Image (cartoon, coloured by chain):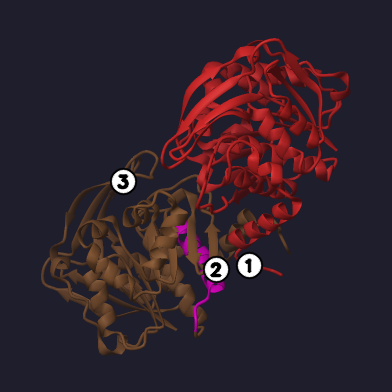
Chain colours: A red, B brown
Amino acid sequence: MSVLVVGSIALDHVKTPVEEQSELLGGSASYAAVSASFFSNVNLVGVVGDDFPKKHIEFFGDRKIDLAGLQIVEGKTFRWSGEYHWDLNTRETRSVELNVFEHFTPDLPSAFTDTPYVLLANIAPSLQSHVLDQMSRARFVIADTMDLWISIAKDDLLALLKRVDMLILNDSEARQLTGETSLIRAGAAIRKMGPKFVAIKKGEHGCLLFGENAFFSCAAFPLEDIHDPTGAGDTFAGGVAGYLASLNHEQVTFEHLRKAVVYGSVLASYNVEAFSLERLRSLTHQDLEHRYQSFRLMSHFEILG
Amino acid sequence: MSVLVVGSIALDHVKTPVEEQSELLGGSASYAAVSASFFSNVNLVGVVGDDFPKKHIEFFGDRKIDLAGLQIVEGKTFRWSGEYHWDLNTRETRSVELNVFEHFTPDLPSAFTDTPYVLLANIAPSLQSHVLDQMSRARFVIADTMDLWISIAKDDLLALLKRVDMLILNDSEARQLTGETSLIRAGAAIRKMGPKFVAIKKGEHGCLLFGENAFFSCAAFPLEDIHDPTGAGDTFAGGVAGYLASLNHEQVTFEHLRKAVVYGSVLASYNVEAFSLERLRSLTHQDLEHRYQSFRLMSHFEILG
């Protein structure tokens, strides 16, 4: 089945303690769409300027991502610039130029409105709600968000949460949204805001998945060399959504989500091995299965077969 | 089989944001010995003053802990006082009175010198080495340590590391000892210092186990209410050592250690539910097995049976 991915498409400038690269393909929807495409068809909704390199559009096309919802408008593409500190866990945004993204309205081609799986990657919650207004048969809706929206658009976000099946956010955002220091309490509190499932990302500590009377702790893959953490969370969300769409069950269960967050973590762990989406270009399904098995070995303590 | 536990025995004063209690049974050896006693016989080596309450000695005895190595000397028992912040992750030591512990030398009764499993709970590394000097047939030696010894007795600690099979320490101590920000690199670096196995404790994020070309990430049990985190690390170490001793294999393998750190985590997760060692008093083997199964459910993503 297909997954609809809506979010930002950007050209990034990324500086780490050892490398610096510019005009990189970036943005929440780019990472999420390419990641999801490993498992299912993807309908992409986003906006770029007329300066957006053709090679990136071709890359999306090569991944069999349907670009009917890609708006190419006059002006410059959204640009983001960030710098990572030595531990690669903390980063500073150096500049943001919204450009054509400033007036983006995610209007869906009619062919996209009945896509069964929906990933609302990180954009303003009012725009995420606007997407849902247009969907007719969404079976499972995942939303991602960020600290900015919790600060400046909390009411919009709370309204959105009543309409989504799953929220993905990181640990500091979960604490900010709920006022709880304990992530266990935060996960439970967010479920009361609407989403049946919540995934709290903890970076190098993996992620926590919350459901009704159900809890799963997913380990992080032990990487010694991280080259660029940009987009790890979006890649994770895309992998989760894409895997669920590939299962194509009438109802998404907690058992499905266990494996989905492992596949999301597998994809994210590969993605940070190189700048931008470079690692995903050469990634094979064999690579995915190989690391999926590694996740089993590193997190199961009763190894069966 | 038996495990020898050497470390501190203390009377603690603990203050959390909601409770405050004094004259509590504490110290690294108390937690570790009682925890280990759930799985195996324990030979305890430590020192207390003549003010040490008889009820605590009786408690050790009830747990079938051999007290032939317990020195009761004139003077006051070691006292520690600490206060926890709201998140219960950070604590401040308010006062330390070494008292009789200041001149403690862990001399072993001859009956203890051939104990096959050894847990050197947190005391000065020179004293930990002194214990090993007396052991004739130690099969598997685990050492715990703390930031203080890395700061003031690093040479002693490095000498000890060449003589132990496994080091247990927390994340900040692993970073301090190795100068690595990445815990993955830190674990590998510590293995090069001597121990074949390393467990890095990450508090609410669980723990990481390192072996030769082997890695295991153990989740933390999702507790909503933590009453007193004191001794969690010592209880963990005691559970690991006790479980290994109960298996009584000629050689400890990584597969044994996976389960051992889960049992250690189970015991630690119960222990923090109440002040001091109170929770361990009423804990049953059925409780242990119940939570062991919960660990499976929360960390395995392919649930078999």
Task: Name which residue type carries label 3.
Answer: Arg
Q: Is residue B82 above or below residue A158?
A: below
Quadrant of the snapshot with the N terminus of chain A: top right
Name the mark on residue A302: 1
- Quarter occupied by the C terminus of chain A: bottom right
Whether residues under marks 2 and 1 lie with C-beta atoms below 8 angstroms apart, the answer is: yes
Same-subunit check for callouts 3 and 1 = no
Q: Amino acid at mark 2?
A: Lys
Identity of the amino acid at label 1? Glu
Q: Is residue B152 magenta?
A: no
Q: Residue at x 60, y 65 (%)?
A: A301
Disc 2 sits on a residue from what chain?
Answer: B
- Which label belongs to residue B181? none
Q: Which residue is mark 3?
A: B91
x then y, percent, for residue A170 = 55, 36
Q: Counting other residues with Cα less than 10 Å from the Cα at mark 3, is it few (<14), some (14-19), or many (20 or more)?
A: some
The numbered mark 3 sits on a residue in which chain? Answer: B
Is the C-beta separation of discs 3 and 2 under 8 Å?
no
| Magenta stretch contains residue B265 | yes
The answer to which of marks 3 and 2 sits earlier in the sequence is 3
For disc 2, the marked residue is B259
Q: What span is colored magenta in the figure?
A: B251-270
As measured in the structure, the alpha-carbon distance from the residue carrying label 3 to the one carrying label 2 is 29 Å
Could you say whether the residue bearing mark 3 is in a helix, strand or loop? strand
Residue A162, quarter of the rendered image: top right
CA gap between label 2 and label 1 equals 8 Å
